[in-house]
Structure formats: C-alpha cells, structure tokens
C-alpha cells in the first residue's frame, strides 16, 4: 500500500539572534532528520515532550514551514514544491482557544472556510449540516462563537478542518485544555473520522489518548524519532521490566541521580504532586530493587511504595529519557 | 467565477465581523468628526458655505484612509493574534483573494465616517447636503473604498513578515492626508507632491466624490480609481508571492 504521508530525513533549523545591541546569530535545530511513513486510513501518533519537534514536523507537512533539509510528500505531492496541491487535500486542526472568528456564528465561520476551500455553493449547505452533526453542534450553529465552551470550540475546529472532505487530517493536540467529558467526545469524533476512511496524523501529550486512538506511534525527542511502532510494540519494549512508584516528600536531585545510577534501572521520572513527589523507577527484568532503591532515598520522607506493569507512558518516559 | 465570489463572500464576512465591534464603529464614526469640525471652521472663515460640503467630503475620505492606515497594516497581525493567519495561509485559495477582502472590509468601515461627517455638518453647521449627481456619487463611494482598500492590501502584503508592522502603517496616516489633497487642494502644495498624490487612491477617490457632489467630471477620476485598484492588486500578488515564501522560510506566520 502506498504511503499517504512520507518524510525522509526531514530537518528544520530555526535561525534567530540573541542580544540587543550586538546581535549574535543563533541556530536551533528543531527537527534533526526524521523519517516515517503513514499508510492510507491509518491513525498515526506523534508523541514527544514540549519542544521535541512535533508541531514543527506537522507545520512542514502542511506547507506552513519550509524544511531546511530532507523531503516530505503528502499524497504524492512534495510539500515544498507543490504546496497548493497539498493544501487542497488536507485538513488542519490545532488545539487551544484561538483560530475562530469569535464575533461571528459557527455557521458564518464554516461558510467562510467552505468558500476558502472551494466547496461549491450547492454542496455547502448539506456538507455544513453533515459536519455539524458529526461533531454534535447541530442546533447551536447560529450562536456566536464567543459564547461557546472550550469543548464546543474544539469540535467546531474539527468541523472546519474536515469541511472540504480532505483525505488527510492533521490534528495538533486537539484535546488540549478540554475537560474529560469533552475530550472523550472528541476522541469519539476522531475515531469516527478514521472509520470514515480518513488518514489522521495526531500529536498529543496524553498517553491514554494515544494508546486508545493510534494504530502506530512515533516518539520524538530533541528533534529525532527515538521509537516507533504500535502501542503494544512500544509497551513490549519495556514489558520485561517492572515499574516501582515511590511517594517522597522533598527529594533532591542528587538522590534522583543516585537512583538513576543503580544497576538495572532503565528510566527515572519525578512527577510533582502538590506537597509530594512521585518517583517512577523503571527496572529491567524481574529484578527486585525496592530495598536498594529505598536505601538510596535515605534522609527523604517516604510514603506509599507500589509496583505495577509498564504502561505506554512508561514506554514513552523510557524512550525520551534514554540519553539524559 | 470562483474568485470574485470568494472575494465578495470574504468582504461580507469581514465587514460583518468588524461591524460587530462597537469600538471599531465608534472610532470610524467619531474620529473624523474632530477633523471635519476643524475643516468647517477653517473653510467657513475663508471662502463660505459651498466649500463646507467640500470640507465635509474631505473629512469623510480622511476617515476611510485613517481606518485603512491604522488597521490594514495590522490586518495580518490581527489574524495572527486570532490564531487564524496559519489557517488562512494553509487554505488552497490564492492568498491575495484571502487578504484583499479583509483590507477592503477595513476600508469599508470608513463608510460610517461618510455618514457621520455629512450628518454632523448638516446638524451643527447647517451644510446643504445637495449631491449634484447622486448616481455617480453612489458609484464613487464603493470605487473609493475598493481602491483605498487595495492600497491597504499593498501595505498589509509588504508587512506580512513583520510582527510590529502596524506601527509603520499608522505612521502613513497623516502624510497621506496632506499629500492627497483631502484638506487642502493639491494646487497649493509643492509641485513634486503631485506625482506621488496621483499614485495614491485617496486622491482620485476624493476627486470622484467631490465632483459627483459639487459638479465636475467624475468618470476620469473613477477610471483612475479602477486603474489603481488593478495596479495595487498586481503589486500585492507579486509581494505576497515573495513574502509568503519568505514567511514559510523564516517561520513568522504564527505567534510562537
């Protein structure tokens, strides 16, 4: 099957300056040579921490940014040389509060974008009704967007992005800041898109979302792909290990480094939780390291200690912290 | 047929969006009244009643230009702040047909200033608002709005790369008032100003509206409005082609 989205050694360097009077040029390599392919009808996830290069990658694929190296094609069209051909065939949706004309109704917003995408006047009415139904906004379309909740705005974003029935949809953190019920509804809408035959490239921070939705995932860290596969394959990468979680109060960086240096420890992460921290330690094999671990935390106040099977989040943490 | 429809639809949407802001309307309607008042007082002290309509129309076109100069340069920046610039650029429609309706809608908001200055002049100064050729006047107003809006498009196109572009555009407000003869006739200005004035749409829009209202040859001025509209459009196409590519290279389309 031919790939719908292809990236080969894709690179993007941002050039900027530092200083006020004596300006010095500065180069930031946001994407440092990534390659991947997305098949037709697939929901492909790009996961990575903030600043990893996910949004930069999407922006190159949707023709908003020119790559500084490598190539990318969407539906066979080169994103650098054939931007209009790519633009006709894709939809782009991002998360957040902006991206809509707030003082206009949802209907006015959709009609305007239907014109921009060349949806014929005859087809517009039926298509707008169809997408409103799909995202659950039927009956609210004549209200001004400024009165919409965060979840409704995000659903309107999706309606706008698929109005022209694109073959490929790029979703950049679409559930960002949406409440759990709204996020669940959005996930259902995204699944509906894939069932309808669309190819979707999704970036998200939410592991549960990626695990539930994605057929395949690429994990990006510091501009490079550090892992790729199905959610099950990525989990299997850490499945022969165990995860120990320790609640601690006031752990210092030296103690974390000592734990990280222990033999058999593959990844360590610290999650801030109000007054306490949760130390998440991944170990390889069935090795029991709890006692050794607690010995390294001497001096810190320790709360609950538990052990569990690895999740996609553990696989993700192991991948993005591998070389730290 | 698709692009004229896209242009018209875009104009209606943006005019509606801008008109939904009471602040925008108040600014467009009230700001020119200050200048209209000064002009009425100056002209009344000088050549008498017939010139007051001349001054009133000058102040109205000042309103159209002020709205354009202060907002068109910032049109890109506003779309950027709304988070819409990337969505507009990534649409397959040629960007000139996306941006032109925005700048023309901004100039169109200046029409509120025509209504307010004429009403102000009538109520406070008793100006006889008699239009010599109502049909041609009705043609001159949209022709002026279109031409001034397209000049705003050239400004907006040239400034797409720069996030603080509106400051530059606002700086053009007063010089254009002066050199296009909106308040004082071109004949009293130095000769070197004339070629510059001829290249600027407010000069011809003003002339078309004044001749239609006070008597005189309207069609040559309307023809010049049309020529400048096309010329500005072509310049904008070239500028946008270059600057959109540069913006994709420099990553200046979004806020972050």
Image: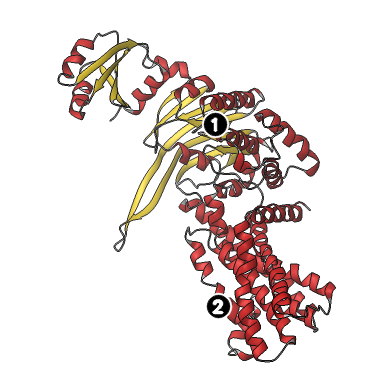
User: Does B83 appear above or below B210?
Assistant: above
* Residue A223 x/y as whole percent: 39, 37
Question: Which residue is more in the foreground, A298 or A256?
Answer: A298
* Residue A225 x/y as whole percent: 41, 31
What residue is rendered at 72% in x and 54% in y?
B12
What residue is rendered at 63% in x and 73% in y?
B33
Local packing at callout 1 (Cα closer than 10 Å; few below 14, some 14-19, many 20+) is: many
Are the residues at dot 1 and dot 2 in contact (C-beta closer than 8 Å)?
no
- All told, the count of numbered labels is 2
Residue A161 sits in which quadrant? top right
User: Does B236 appear above or below B130?
Assistant: above
User: Does A200 appear above or below B256?
Assistant: above
Q: Secondary structure at mark 2?
A: helix
Colouring method of the image: secondary structure
Local packing at callout 2 (Cα closer than 10 Å; few below 14, some 14-19, many 20+) is: few
Q: Chain of mark 1?
A: A
* Residue B34 x/y as whole percent: 60, 75
* Residue A262 x/y as whole percent: 20, 18
Q: Chain of mark 2?
A: B
**For this view, does B10 lie left or right of residue A220?**
right
Q: Is residue A86 visible?
A: no
Q: Secondary structure at mark 1?
A: strand
Q: Is residue A224 visible?
A: yes
Numbered mark located on residue B113 in the image: none
Marks 1 and 2, how far apart in space? 51 Å
Q: Are marks 1 and 2 on the same chain?
A: no
Q: Which one is in front in this view, the residue at disc 1 or the one at disc 2? A: 2
Q: According to the image, label 2 marks what residue? A: B175
Q: According to the image, label 1 marks what residue? A: A201
């Amino acid at each position: 099957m031919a790939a719908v989205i292809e990236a080969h050694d894709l690179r993007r360097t941002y050039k900027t300056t530092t200083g006020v009077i004596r300006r010095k040029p500065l180069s930031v390599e946001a994407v440092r040579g990534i390659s991947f392919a997305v098949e037709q009808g697939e929901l492909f996830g790009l996961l990575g921490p903030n600043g990893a290069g996910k949004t930069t990658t999407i922006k190159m694929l949707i023709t908003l940014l020119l790559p500084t190296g490598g190539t990318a094609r969407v539906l066979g069209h080169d994103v650098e040389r054939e931007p209009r051909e790519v633009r006709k065939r894709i939809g782009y949706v991002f998360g957040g509060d902006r991206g809509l004309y707030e003082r206009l109704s949802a209907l006015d917003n959709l009609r305007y974008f239907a014109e921009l995408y060349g949806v014929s006047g005859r087809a517009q009415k039926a298509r707008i009704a169809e997408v409103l139904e799909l995202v659950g906004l039927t009956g609210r379309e004549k209200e001004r967007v400024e009165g919409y909740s965060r979840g409704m705005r995000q659903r309107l974003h999706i309606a706008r992005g698929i109005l022209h029935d694109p073959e490929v949809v790029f979703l950049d953190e679409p559930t960002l800041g949406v409440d759990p019920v709204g996020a669940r509804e959005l996930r259902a809408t995204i699944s509906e898109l894939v069932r309808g035959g669309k190819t979707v490239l999704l970036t998200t921070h939410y592991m549960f979302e990626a695990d539930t939705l994605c057929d395949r995932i690429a994990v990006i860290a510091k501009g490079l792909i550090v892992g790729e596969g199905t959610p099950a394959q990525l989990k299997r990468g850490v499945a022969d290990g165990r995860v120990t979680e320790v609640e601690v109060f006031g752990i210092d960086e030296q103690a974390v480094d000592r734990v990280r240096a222990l033999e058999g420890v593959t990844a360590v992460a610290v999650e801030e939780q109000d007054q306490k921290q949760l130390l998440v330690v991944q170990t390889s094999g069935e090795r029991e390291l709890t006692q050794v671990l607690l010995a390294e935390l001497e001096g810190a106040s320790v709360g609950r200690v538990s052990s569990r099977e690895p999740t996609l989040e553990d696989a993700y943490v192991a991948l993005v912290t591998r070389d730290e | 047929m698709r692009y004229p429809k896209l242009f018209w639809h875009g104009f209606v949407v943006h005019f509606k969006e801008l008109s939904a802001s009471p602040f925008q309307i108040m600014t467009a309607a009230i700001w020119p009244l200050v200048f209209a008042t000064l002009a009425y007082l100056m002209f009344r002290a000088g050549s008498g009643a017939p010139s007051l309509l001349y001054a009133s129309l000058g102040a109205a076109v000042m309103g159209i230009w002020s709205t354009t100069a202060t907002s068109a340069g910032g049109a890109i920046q506003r779309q950027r702040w709304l988070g819409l610039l990337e969505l507009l650029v990534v649409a397959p429609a040629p960007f000139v047909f996306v941006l032109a309706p925005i700048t023309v809608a901004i100039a169109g908001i200046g029409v509120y200033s025509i209504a307010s200055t004429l009403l102000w002049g009538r109520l406070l100064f008793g100006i006889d608002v008699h239009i010599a050729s109502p049909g041609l006047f009705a043609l001159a107003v949209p022709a002026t709005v279109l031409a001034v809006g397209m000049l705003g498009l050239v400004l907006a196109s040239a400034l797409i790369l720069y996030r603080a572009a509106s400051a530059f555009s606002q700086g053009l407000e007063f010089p254009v008032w002066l050199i296009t003869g909106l308040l004082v006739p071109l004949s009293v200005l130095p000769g070197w100003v004339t070629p510059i004035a001829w290249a600027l749409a407010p000069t011809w829009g003003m002339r078309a509206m004044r001749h239609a209202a006070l008597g005189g040859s309207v069609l040559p001025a309307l023809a010049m409005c049309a020529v400048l509209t096309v010329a500005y459009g072509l310049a904008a196409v070239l500028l946008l082609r270059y600057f959109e590519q540069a913006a994709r290279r420099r990553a200046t389309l979004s806020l972050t």
